[in-house]
Image: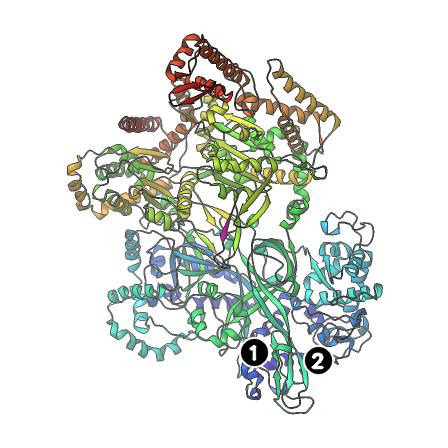
Amino acid sequence: MSSPTSTPGRKRARTDNPSTPSNDAATSPPSQRRRGQDSSTGELPPMPTSPATDMLSPAVPQDTSLFSSPRHSVLPSEVDMSSPLMYGTPSSRVEGTPRSGVRGTPARQRPDLGSVRKAPQVDLHSDLPNDDGAAVSDGQNAGQRLVIWGTDVNVGTCKEKFQRFLQRFIDPNSTEDENAGLDLNEPLYMQKLEEISVVGDPVLNVNCGHVQSFDAELYRQLICYPQEVIPTFDMAVNELFFERFPDSILEHQIQVRPYNALKTRNMRSLNPEDIDQLITISGMVIRTSQLIPEMQEAFFQCQVCAYNTRVEVDRGRIAEPAVCRNCNTTHSLALIHNRSVFSDKQMIKVQESPEDMPAGQTPHTTVVYAHNDLVDKVQPGDRVNITGIYRAVPMRVNPRQSNVKSVYKTHIDAIHFRKTDEKRLHRLDEEAEQKLFTEDRVQTLKELAAKPDVYERLSSALAPSIYEHEDIKKGILLQLFGGTRKDFSQTGRGNFRAEINILLCGDPGTSKSQLLQYVFNLVPRGQYTSGKGSSAVGLTAYVMKDPETRQLVLQTGALVLSDNGICCIDEFDKMSDNTRSVLHEVMEQQTLSIAKAGIICQLNARTSILAAANPVESQWNPKKTTIENIQLPHTLLSRFDLIFLMLDPQDEAYDRRLAHHLVSLYYQSEEQLEEEFLDMTVLKDYIAYARTYINPRLNEEASQALIEAYVDMRKIGSGRGMVSAYPRQLESLIRLAEAHAKVRFSDKVETIDVEEAKRLHREALKQSATDPRTGFVDISILTTGMSATARKRKEEVAQALKKLIQAKGKTPAMKYQQLFDDLRGQSETAITKELFEEALRALADEDYLTVTGKTVRLLA
Amino acid sequence: YFYLLTLAYNPLHCLSSFYISASSQNNPESGWEAKAVLFFKEQLKDKEAHTSVPSLNDVPLHYLKPNSLVRFRCLIQDMFDPEFYMGAYETVDPSTKARVLRCGKYKDVTECGVDLNSRNTVTAERQTFYCVPIPGENPWVKEISFSQARVVPSTSYVPSRQKRSYEEDDDMDTQPQKQREPHTGMSCFHTEPHGNGDCKRQETEAPSSQTTSASHLDLNFPLPGEKGPSCLVKVYEDWDSFKLNDTLEVYGILSVSPALSALAEEKDASSSLLDPAECMETAEEQRVHSPPASLVPRLHMIYAKPLPHCNPLLPSAALEDNKKQSNEFLSSTLSEMASVRTELLAYLTHVLLGDALAAEYLILHLISSVYARRDVLPLGKFTLNVSGCPTVASYTERLYQIIQQLVPCSYRLSMSLQNMNQLRLVPKKDYVANRLVSGALQLARNTSLFLDETQLEQGQLDTTGVRNITALGNLISWQKVDYDFNYHQMEFPCNINVLIASEGRSLLPSDCQVHLQPQVAPPQMEEYLSAIHMHPQASSQLNKFRLYLSLARTLDYSISDEVTKAVEDDFVDMRKDDPQSISAEDFHRLLVVARLLSLSLGQTSLSRDSWMRAKHIETLRRSRTEQQQQCVNGNEP
């Protein structure tokens, strides 16, 4: 048992040898400095995870392997229990009510900061003698220059600085939603303290960014020596708080939780230099463990005289008092398990978020320990920003050998969690995205936006390997940007859809799938499914039994997963009707309602849909309407803002350009490839930036232009007795105009945006809603599935048929085939069988006749 | 040369001498590692040296001396988290109190008496890769590389064979000589019953012992039924440059210290209870991340050579390092290529029941490779669907055996309903054990994947089945596999040659479909087929084919402006005559066919002749497909 001596030995060495050059220690890299201290954990026998039965029996004295030997009984008594230095230890607990003020409120241990004893051991107020464990720098002006051993932190100054920060820090430009409802021109954190006094939740979250802008030196200390600085902050905050609100009663003393340490954002960039520093990383929770009770304070009772004593756990180890202080019996103290103090601990595994990863590598994972009230704060699947202290502990091969496996186990002691996707509830985009853009980047993006041809540039950067189809690319570009989100829930209308839906239809082999794949790869939250391979549940959500917990859980499908993104659906026409019907709700209300297996809920699915469909007859039939060609229900079609036809234009110049394009595709130099790759990242950033920051609104002129456009559209048809526009088309126009304004980084929707929206919309209509019989654009093809002329024709046939039947006089039943032939003979235009059947159906609807098998019966 | 052998034998000594010389100059950061790595690279440059290093692929693990230099031809199957280790540490001699600064690099376990509180401890970072032998590597590759390596090192491991048994125990040879001595007697005793000196027998025994112990420890090979050691490779530098599924030849220091295995530790229950650091991981995770070193040895990488292909016949090193030599090599083989091609064509025609067109396409398929990607579009892939395969006499199986003889890596996936519903094709992350559980589609580049659709019968695909089919479809169309990370999917680009053998048109997409027209009458089929395999190909002939296929794939290719123009004109003309005759997609295919055809003839740029020839065979193929379709349609009503 050589190991237990090391801790007190080191401590003594510290007291005996105050000449330890603290300057030296402070300048040495923290990772190395602290290595020595922390690594001792590996050498010490840690506390038992569960009490062995014999520990409670008098046989304990013989059992020296688990607890330290008698000569260490001095250990916990070096500091007087009643001294103010005992701040932060449970021994200072004052029981009884009412409790208020610093002294009255129990402090709570902070296992997240590691050893709690550390602070009192080395903590020095300038007015105290410096003989108990702190190193003095020069000794001349000891009062001022005292620092915590191994650091350059002076408790007094640090406290003072932090109090000043709390009292003075103002951030008028704050946009964080935590600060909602606070007066931005008053000291921010004082308001938060006030909130604490009202709400009674004794946690103060401090944004490290604020500390940095207020006092860079303090920030540096916080990052480098969190273990020492945060307790100091705690102290400062509590003094300040109870000075201000002396009567407030808190559960325990206020704890400071810094977050947003700008040190690290990516798990991959953690390196040995970050050990024992305050870091912030982002990632996704993949596993959480059961709650682990960790002993914080052991309770011992003397078996002889029933004298109680408490011993704190120091670095995972309990120093068992060997001699009872009351009756001086040796080895008489037994651990009373259920009177000891435990804290909650949870192991959380965090994985790099997929966006942060370089291609072709697997994600890294890190172990995070959450303590006390941070336990169960996060669930697997959550995306979180974690602020904590990075730790490394050496591993051992065999406790009986002194060989050490030369590897450290690393983990993070979490201090603060911040869920990044939680914010979606607040309708704000992720904060992580904001950080993505450096000033330089924003500058480049803005420069790009200022160019007059930015719209064309971007659309040509989209899927460069796909040839031509300019308008389609423009449409998809606008889809990527999306409209402005509007909330009318107060007036009862709910949300207006801001997402633009696009349908591409056309001949097979016109690179529709490729376009879809490209878009899917471009957007961060994209999903790609194929109509053939997906079922309704695969698109929406399904309930399944979790194999581990045996609980019913909701598994979300592609549409929910692409919330705020784009859902690409290939082979839309191959989708079963059942599946397609799910889309109705998603495409207009942007929600998904689920009622199955006792789970009834409504999920958000604010997704744009980019679908591709092949014509039914494998080749597009130009003599038929869109509906007839793709056989999709018009209720669904009318929900698409833009429907494009991708047809193979058959002319020579086009062919030549296409050939050139394809050949160059197969033989192109490396640099050109590189150039394009750059384009894609720029495009990605451009879209992300515009989606985050630009929220254009209609200006007066634009509204007028929109109204005119709408009226015009309606007028076109009215001349021929057709309706060529519905309010849905107006909404589409607005969305397109807004998206175009976003492309220009403009906060206002102006006339040019409306012009382009009109043009694109007309273009799409021209392609998809042209009545092949008349050559006119007829929106009712899309809204009712039938052009107005066709409807008129149907009515005429029905009337002619009725006349024919009436002319036949009173025959109750007729042969189907004969009637058809008669009608054909009578009519001057060709009557197809379909038309005839439709006419019959129309008459049946009028209750004029019924059709049973091959006979037609008149109803009297 | 003798120097080299000792180097291979005791590389750590050599490394530490580098370290000592650096630290004696009082400058431990002086880049001694770079120097050392360079030194090793230099030493290994010439061919002799490279083969004198024993390979983990060939030599059973128990023959290899711990801490010796070995090489390993492998695929990166998984990447673990980076770990921090003691890059440098100080030891204290308990009796003399003398402090010695030591280097912790390239080692797993520190030496005795580490002073954990020393100020001089340097923490460093390294990365661990889980590497498996290249999946689907065909027996001939193993044989050839084995025979190449065998030449020299037989001497190098004979002594160790006498000294060591494969039930090697715990000595960490810090002082190899001294510690070895007492063991020698013991080991001899151990080896005796196995028949001393007869290495053949020991070899056959070794895998069996491995498989028995492997049964409770899944070594995570992508393909079922694979054998061979897997390795935990510790990478010290530049680990970002490696990607998942890269194929490498790793040169490193073998570490098999039994202290590393977690299983050994589990027996010692009290110890794991005592150490809180050990409790961080679940038992499964420990089992995976620290498997017994006797099964999964650790390899401390000194340097790694990326393998563009794993054909031992094609000298990969020579191609890169020595321009002149490689040029000579290239020109000599290029001139031969056309003649080899004729022979190969004749051979394949024979195999494909006398169908020369199908044989032509098969050659094109075998040399295809994704050479670039334009946004999402992989260029150069050429998935071939050979339809109309006879179902008698397990023809597809025989066809696969032939292909197996020709390409370095291949795998036959029988698309039976059961297989489709049960096999795990897509790798999936197992968060409990924190590893990537491999699937059959985790393959090295240019592996031939033979999908046997003739095995498919009627029945219902379940969810896994549908997912597997989708994964295959994605693989063929986009040359990518979406690995399943439970909460999200991650896309890994791949480069796999997919060949589909089917009766009718395949249900999977393909770039090109050739309908087989057997010249053999059905009654004689059986006889003919059994004759295919009887015909013994001279191994030199086979080697020529193998070399040809690998080489054709690596050639560069270009199209001159003049030919570009002609090709464009051709396209426009064809469209003018009949717009339906050629679509953009057809043109895409035609360009690929022309490219592959030129390369197969050893021409590195497109000539008019090749273009015409490509057009010709495409026309032949299309007319055949149309015929077939008409035939089917005619029969249907």
**Main secondary structure type of the part rendered in magenta:** strand
Q: Which residue is under mark 2? A: A15
Q: Which residue is mark 1?
A: A51
Magenta residues (range):
A542-547
Which residue shows up at 37% across the image and 22% down it? Answer: B581
Q: Is residue B118 left or right of residue B249?
A: right
Task: Provide the secondary structure element on which disc 2 rests.
Answer: helix
Left or right? Give the position of A556 relative to A125: left
Which residue is at a point 82% across and 54% down the rendered structure image? A187
Give the quarter of the image for residue A351: bottom right
Question: What type is the residue that disc 1 sits on?
Answer: Pro
Return the x and y of residue A378 as percentages of the image width and height: 61, 57
Left or right position of A123 against B257: right
Location of residue B422 in the rendering, given as x and y in whole percent from the top left corner: 37, 51
Q: Is residue A543 magenta?
A: yes
Query: Residue A479: x, y in percent?
Result: 59, 33
Residue B155 to residue A456: above or below: below
Q: Nearer the viewer, mark 2 or mark 1?
A: 1
Tell me the distance, in whole angstroms, between the alpha carbons under discs 2 and 1.
34 Å
Q: Are marks 2 and 1 in contact (CB under 8 Å)?
A: no
Are the residues under badges 2 and 1 in a single subunit? yes
Circle 2 crowding by C-alpha within 10 Å: few under 14, some 14–19, many from 20: some
Q: How many marks?
A: 2
Q: Please tell me whether residue B472 is drawn above or below residue A620 in the rendered image.
A: below
Disc 1 crowd, CA 10 A, few/some/many (<14, 14-19, 20+): few
